[in-house]
Amino acid sequence: MEIRQLRYFVQVVQSGSMGRAAIELDLVTSALSQQISRLESELSVRLLTRTKNGVQPTNAGLTFWHKAQLILRITDDAAKAAKLGRLSGDASVGLAPTTSGVLALPFLREMKYRYPDVGVRIVESLSGNLESLLASRQIDVAIIFGGTRAKRVQTAPLLSERLYVISADELPAPADPAGYDISELGQFPLILPSSPHGLRSLVDGAFSRAGTAMNVTAEIDGLATLMEAVSNGMGVTIQPAAALERCKGSRLYTVPILAMTLSRVNLIASLADEELTPSGLGARLVLREVALRQVHEGRWLGVTASVQ
């Protein structure tokens, strides 16, 4: 099996046609077809199904296509690194909107300083979406909340995040000076993201365990709009302290919630080591280091780093 055969096969699947792929590869169609046939013979499995409209990957072909893309990406990164004498390639990192507000820029600065030839893509989305993107290999690394159900995604504890009641108006003092108990939060008109947002699931579960009714007056899934509504006195919200990065300049009041009743575990998640490119491995290392540095230097409030 040759690297060029993998490139040919990947292009054929992407093009959906031998003819279109041959044009992209600057080959004669018959020569391309012969190379694919040799690949199938070597593997002793049918990779493509020929139809009147072109070609489609078989189940085996689809699996092979995913692996071939990974091999080609690693090969290309290795070639670039050899030519430049330093780490190069691309890395895609997923962050939730709250996490992004406190971590994205410091991470980008550190990556540019340490690995200037690595192209970085930041994907901002909900934790559940980031997990799906990891499982489908559309991103390399992410910080997610709670456990993962994806078989091909590995996780490690990163930090535990305390949650706060955030309001535009001064909040009444909690019974416990350390923070509100969940049972005290039923008095507030809440603005929260909708289900199945991970934070909403945490909050719903905490209220359910406490046997306390929730007073949800609005559901807003965009963090910027949600915090703007809170800043304008339309209700209060429950968020980590990192959410305050989205509304600098606004005068907001915060009271912590007792961690024993409600907190959020952050995990650093990635593809398995053998599937990560060198640039992906570098990004995972930098993401972890920068996150812990933000905590230790007091730039990420309400957070306790996990001990490993």
Image (cartoon, rainbow, N blue to C red):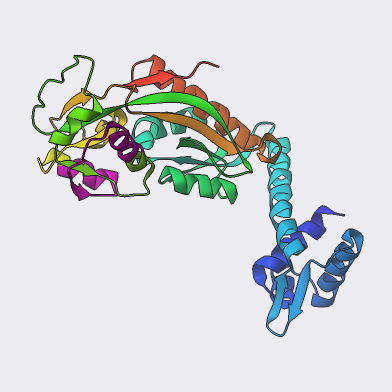
Q: Quadrant of residue 80?
A: top right
Residue 194 spot, x, y in % from top left? 30, 49
Residue lying at 52% horizontally and 32% vertically, measured from the top left: 268
Tell me where residue 192 sits by quadrant.
top left
Give the magenta-colored segment's residue range: 202-229
Image quadrant where one finds the C terminus: top right
Residues 95 and 206: in front is 206
In the foreground, 183 or 298:
183
Question: Where is residue 41 drawn, in percent x and y?
Answer: 91, 65
Question: What residue do we see at 51% from left, 15% from top?
Answer: 307
Q: Is residue 301 left or right of residue 78?
A: left
- Near-viewer residue (27 or 156): 156
Answer with left or right where residue 191 lies relative to residue 87. Answer: left
Image coordinates for residue 294, horizontal then vertical, percent: 40, 21
The image position of residue 108, as x and y in percent, is: 45, 33
The one nearer the camera, 201 or 298, is 201
Q: Is residue 107 above or below residue 218?
A: above
Residue 300 located left or right of residue 166: right
Question: Is residue 146 among what the camera can see?
Answer: yes
Task: Answer with the quarter of the image where residue 182 lies.
Answer: top left
